[in-house]
Amino acid sequence: MTDVNVPSSLDGVEPVQSVRTPIRMEYTFTPGVAAQTYLREFGNKKILGNVSPIDGAILVPPRGADPRHGALCEEFVEMPHTGHIGSYCVTNVPIPGRDLDLPYISAWIFLDGADVGFLNLVAECPPEECRIGMRVEAVWKPDEEIGMTAENILYWKPSGGPDIPFAEAGVRGWHARKQGETNA
Amino acid sequence: MESHERLSAPLVLEYPFTRTTGPVIGAFLTGLRERIVLGIKRKDGTVLVPPTEYDPATSEALTEMVEVEQTGEVITWTWVQEPRDQSPWDRPHALAMIKLDGADTPLLHAVLVDSPETLDTGTRVRIKWREETEGHIKDIEGFLPVESKND
């Protein structure tokens, strides 16, 4: 680093080495038709997915379109509250603004029957026991606290039962099924 | 389809960044905390305020920091009648490019006057420091016209 010469009036004073530059953006979020439908049912403790009109793929949460084809998804299906871990990450380093006990596990949860996953917390599971393919179930907030919010599900916990084989877990399942169709 | 009231909710995105400042911006902010303004000298002798680590035209590393005056001139400006919630200023003010005496480039800051009628391009202004300085551009509360009665 090049040496910088400063006026002698700053000799001996503590140099500033960092500056706080917080960023804050305030939005009003207005969900579209698919997200509104999803949220209203989520407020009834139901999880909806969209059905792709192209190949029947189940997309959770529903976004109103199949992004692979740009196709409108108008059909909804109710999903079970069980699934498996497609992939996961154990966080050991605190993040400002995230008030979770360390270490915690975030995972891509694939609901039974779903073709895509979503990111959520996994708990009641020591990190060393977490694994791809592990079966999980939703732990909901108490009924009186349920609302139209993503916070309804506190986390996912191991539900027991045999793991999904690694080769079929998460997005690998998609490819495994494709392969099966090709071979059929 | 059932008819419902449209859903809507506030959504706030917030990042508590702390940035390291480097030798030049760090010295500039140190200066503000000590209530002086530093610029940096280019090879041709002109002075950049606020200072940059590299010459914007030639990309040469710049190292010679110099103190400039706390008075200057409004080069151009606009009037802000209704500051937004996150503005550093909570009342109407001018946002101006201010060329401090001894500097060759202007600095963006507020001119704290009550109405746009009292401001012109070329108006002479001087720094109004905050009571407590911490090494931040907000250590300058704004600029006041040199002839201002608020002096």
Image: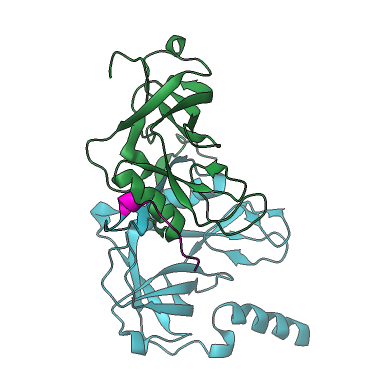
Chain colours: A cyan, B green
Residue at image x 43%, y 11%? B118
Q: Is residue B150 above or below residue A95?
A: above
- Residue B147 place in picture, x, y as percent: 36, 15
Q: Position of residue B125 (x, y in %)?
A: 41, 23
- State the residue in front, B39 or B119: B39
For the C terminus of chain B, give its image quadrant: top left
User: Residue at the location (53% across, 18% down)?
Assistant: B121
Position of the N terminus of chain B by quadrant: top right
Q: What residue is at 57 percent from the left and 69 percent from the top?
A: A116
Helix, strand or loop: magenta stretch: loop
Q: Quadrant of residue B111?
A: top left
A77 or B63: nearer the viewer: B63
Q: Is residue A85 a member of the stretch shown in magenta?
A: no
- Which residue is at a point 65% across and 84% down the rendered structure image? A176
Query: Of residues B63 and A131, which is closer to you in this image?
Result: B63
Instruction: Please state if A73 lies on the left or on the right of B122 as rendered.
Output: right
Asked if residue A8 is among those painted magenta in the image, a careful observer would answer yes
Whether residue B41 sits left or right of residue A97 in the image: it is right
Q: Is residue A21 visible?
A: no
Q: Is residue B85 visible?
A: yes
Q: Which residues are magenta?
A: A1-10
